[in-house]
Image (spheres, rainbow, N blue to C red):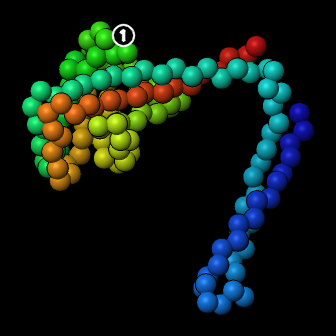
Amino acid sequence: MERHRKCKKVVRMIDFKDYGKKIVCQTHIEITPIDSSEVSIIPTVNRYFYIPASNITVTTGVTIPSNLFYNDDGSPTTEFMIFNPNGYVNLYINGVMQEGGMYSVNANSLIINPTPGIIRAGTAIIIESLGFSSEKI
């Protein structure tokens, strides 16, 4: 297949008072066309749910073991399925996605880094693990 080069230009204003000053950056991007009929991308999604019975103080950090969570089927979880390197994990607390640097997840636990605050009893904690694989058709 033939390779193509494409140039993407980004223009930013330095000073809004002086519209004559601009920075123009050029970034070269290599593009290799793929016939989409040759490859299928297959997503896999696993979600895990936990609702604490008591308040969780996170000011010194906290580790929540995976066996406290339930999966999409309502069955207890023994470990989280983590897709590395072809995936990512999202954390939702009370339905709000959290910053990636605030937590980490491994097969056995959710680790919330020290941050001021409390997760109140009855607040939903949801881990969403997404992975991607490809398959030739």
- Count of marks, rendered view: 1
Q: What residue appears at the point 29 percent right and 38 percent down from the top-left corner?
A: 93
One can see residue 45 in this view: yes
Q: Nearer the viewer, residue 73 or 58?
A: 73
Q: What residue appears at the point 40 percent right and 28 percent down from the top-left corner?
A: 128
One can see residue 66 in this view: no
Q: Quarter of the image containing the C terminus?
A: top right
Residue 14 falls left or right of residue 31: left
Q: Nearer the viewer, residue 43 or 122?
A: 122
Identity of the residue furthest to the right in this view: 2
Q: Position of residue 126 (x, y in %)?
A: 32, 29
* Residue under pointer 1: 73
Residue 104 falls left or right of residue 43: left
Q: Residues within 10 Å of mark 1 (few under 14, many from 20)?
A: few
- Height in image: 86 above or below 56? above
Q: Position of residue 50 (x, y in %)?
A: 24, 25
Q: Quarter of the image containing the N terminus?
A: top right
Q: In terms of secondary structure, where does tag 1 sit?
A: loop
Q: Position of residue 105 (x, y in %)?
A: 32, 33
- Height in image: 106 above or below 30? above
Q: Position of residue 31 (x, y in %)?
A: 79, 44
